[in-house]
Amino acid sequence: MSLGAITIEAQDIESLPFEPIPFEPIEPFLIEPFPLEPIPIKPIETIPLTLFPLEDQNRGNSPIYHIVLVDLIDTVTEAEIEALIADGKDSIVSIPGVCSVDIGLKLRDDRDVHIGDYDLAVYVQLGYAAALDAYGSHPNHQAFLERQRHLWSSIRVIDFSGSAPSTIWNDCQ
């Protein structure tokens, strides 16, 4: 008799510490795949959001993620984009509570699931909810906006809390 990867010889059955359960082998069968229908994706502006105070959304010490999608003006130059990215990283990283910052141009939008209507994204990880409130009004952030806002026509912001404490929590308190 064979039980999965274990083979038990007939003479060994008497020495088993339990009574083996007899079973009938089943014939292999094939499950036919069902046709997959495309899942409709709603544009960001149509997704309803329920707003809760930050302290309700960020119980404990979960990280906060701040994402900005930037639409650059048509006349922006490559040199201006490089300066904007460098200025943003230098200005934002020193704000208390900021764990990490990255800024870059859109990588791709060749699939239907990609958000394609932006040119540049800003990613900021903050260590705790109160840091997000302080971040917006911080002089470094405000000065960066004043220096660079002439290069974009609009921005959209996404803020959400993580579900687990950051692995770099101690570095960004």
Image (cartoon, rainbow, N blue to C red):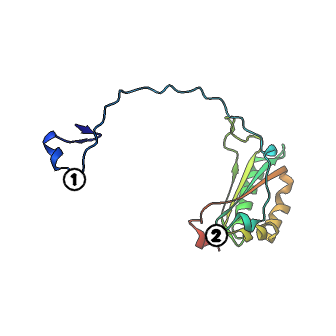
Across and down, in percent, residue 108 comes to 67, 40
Front residue (pair 137, 145): 137
Residue 122 versus residue 172 in the image, above or below: above
Bin the neighbour count of mark 1 within 10 Å (Cα to Cα): few under 14, some 14-19, many 20 and up.
few
Q: Is residue 153 left or right of residue 55?
A: right
Kindly check if marks 1 and 2 are in contact, taking CB atoms under 8 A apart as contact: no
Front residue (pair 120, 47): 47
Q: What amino acid type is highlighted by mark number 2? A: Asn
Quadrant in which residue 112 is drawn: top right
| Circle 1 residue | 17
Q: Is residue 138 left or right of residue 112?
A: right
Residue 88 versus residue 47 in the image, above or below: below
Across and down, in percent, residue 15 comes to 16, 50
Upstream in sequence: badge 1 or badge 2: 1
Furthest-left residue in this view: 11
Q: What amino acid type is highlighted by mark number 1? A: Pro
What SS does tag 2 mark? loop
